[in-house]
Amino acid sequence: MKVELENVKPMDIEKRSFEIITQELGDKALIPGTELIVKRCIHTSADFDYADNLCFSPDAVEKAMEAIKNGACIVTDTQMAKSGINKRALARYGGEVYCFMSDEDVAQSAKKNGTTRATASMDKAASLGKKLIFAIGNAPTALVRLYELIENGKLDPELIIGVPVGFVNVVQSKELIMKADVPYIVAKGRKGGSNIAACIVNALLYMIDNRRD
């Protein structure tokens, strides 16, 4: 059996991938202004379910892009998500990417209070006093703590990207964020991951300026 390969130049692979995604989506209606984010999630995962399970609060994309242009920083719950975000593109607008999961003070706080490190990380982020976008791809406890901080008036994030993957309290934590009075991009259900969190941030960056350096 002969295997037929597409003859695609390296620089054109991403473009060809998006052509395939667009073809396979067919007549699927996506919310105007969210198309690139949805397609990037599909591109990252090869999972077309994201065309149905990504939920956006009203004007979330526009508000997030404006926040980035005004210097908002990104807080993630994994080093993997941090490493996947285009930090040079974010730095053009004065933003940085933070992940506190490995910090010694976070470990000590989690141990003292009997919480996860992700919970303690959100407390540390809330004390930064900066405009923040949260990109959560792993820990539902991070989303639960963000909801608590918002409800208690201790945090007012520019955006929450809520895409943790898994089984325990994953669905419930996402539903909490969708109830909070903040802009959000949430992947309903169990699917998500650090790679999805990072790709949503990058999609927002590329929608502002398609430079990849």
Image (cartoon, rainbow, N blue to C red):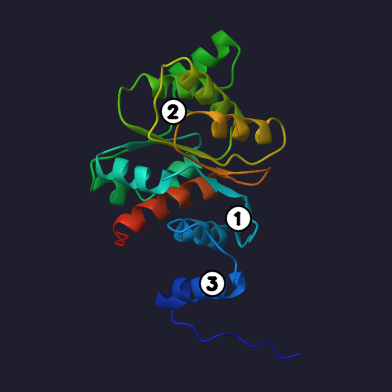
- Secondary structure under the numbered disc 2 in the rendered image: loop
Give the labeled residue for mark 3: 22
N-term-proximal mark, 2 vs 3? 3
* C-alpha distance separating marks 1 and 2: 28 Å
Q: Which mark is residue 50?
A: 1
* Circle 2/circle 3 CB separation < 8 Å: no
Rendered location of residue 140, percent (x, y):
61, 31
Instruction: Choose top left, top right, bottom left or bottom right for residue 212.
Output: bottom left
* Nearer to me, 36 or 118: 36
- Secondary structure under the numbered disc 3 in the rendered image: helix
Give the labeled residue for mark 2: 100
Residue in view at x 59 percent, y 39 percent: 164
Q: Which mark is residue 207?
A: none
* Nearer to me, 113 or 158: 158
Left or right: 126, with 118 as reference point = left
N-term-proximal mark, 1 vs 3? 3
Instruction: Choose top left, top right, bottom left or bottom right for residue 182.
Output: top left
Q: Is residue 97 above or below residue 119?
A: below
